Amino acid sequence: MSLARSAPTALPLCRELTTVSIALTPTTAAVFVSVVLIAGVVNGLAGFGFALVGTMALATVVEPTTAVVFMIVPILAANASLARELSVGDVRTCGRRFGPLLAAALVGTVVGLAAVDRLPAAPLRLGLGVVTLGFVATAQRAVAIPGFDRLKAGCFVETPLAMVAIGGVSGVLFGGTNVGVQLIAYLRSRDLSHELFVGVAAMIFLGLNAVRVGAAGALGLYPDLTTVALSVAAAVPAVAGVAVGRRLRVRIPERTRRRFVLGLLAVVGVRLVVGGLGLA
């Protein structure tokens, strides 16, 4: 896959960054469509994982900052599709309940997005891989992690102050890396039904990415208009993948879904760590 650093341009959406323009070839198109489609299926199945799977997989073949920016519009489209599972009453109730979390995350995600082009590639790959594997370790149920339940009980409490703290930190990380596992972990600790969890997670990430689309353009984070066009076009396989995942969700047992998602994330996480250490 050939990549070329974009030249300076006067276009308002674009400027010279550590993000790298995407050379559109049949191979490039096939890779990007496949990654976004698979990420959509995962998100439809589990209710989360689109940003993590899509960004982490793309970060193994292109610059991580390019992957982060490219995935913003597809993430928005995927979560818009899932957010429809919430009723109007659910939106109002959950909006009030998790309002401090969302408000703090909105501020944090703009801060993180503003710093995305200042993050070096190799350490970013390594950090993303470690975070991904950390999420897998805490989400799996086969081996108990000493002290984790106590830590979760002490930190993941449903108070305005706790939600502001968790939302702010998580927003910064999500804004700069597309990794929102901290928000997912918090929502999973709230004992929501699976259907409500899926809808609430989609509602929060829909709001965050609606802001990020505008912020990315205002900050000039897209290296060129080709990347913008490809990102918008990727919304199609994203929505298609979510639709497939939603249909499979009612047919596949929860235990099998969990194993598939965590297994996929583990593979991606290992690949990122290896790449970040310069071993591959």
Image: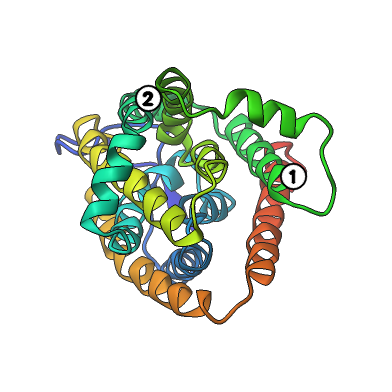
The residue pinned by badge 1 equals: 137
Q: Which mark is residue 194?
A: none
Image quadrant in which you'd find residue 171: top left
> Nearest the camera: 18 or 112?
112
Q: By what rule are the colours in the image chosen?
A: rainbow
Q: How many C-alpha atoms fall within 10 Å of the one at disc 2: few (<14), some, or many (≥20)? A: many
Q: Disc 2 marks which amino acid? A: Gly
* Residue located 36% across and 45% down the image: 205
**158 up-or-down from 199: above or below:** above
Residue 15 position, x and y percent, is 26, 33
Relative side of 44 to 227, left or right? right
Q: Disc 1 marks which amino acid? A: Ala
* Number of marks in picture: 2
Image quadrant in which you'd find residue 226: bottom left
Residue 3 position, x and y percent, is 45, 51
| Residue 48 makes an appearance in the image | yes
**199 up-or-down from 119: above or below:** below
Check contact, mark 2 vs mark 1: CB within 8 A: no
Residue 249 position, x and y percent, is 51, 74
| Residue 209 makes an appearance in the image | no
> Nearest the camera: 158 or 68?
158
* Residue located 22% across and 50% down the image: 225
Secondary structure at numbered mark 2? helix
Relative side of 189 to 102, left or right? right
The residue pinned by badge 2 equals: 108
**22 up-or-down from 238: above or below:** above
Q: How many C-alpha atoms fall within 10 Å of the one at disc 1: few (<14), some, or many (≥20)? A: some
Q: Going from the N terminus, do you reach mark 2 or mark 1 first?
A: 2
Relative side of 219 to 143, left or right? left
Residue 20 position, x and y percent, is 40, 43
Q: What's the distance in space between the residues labelled 2 and 1, CA to CA? A: 25 Å
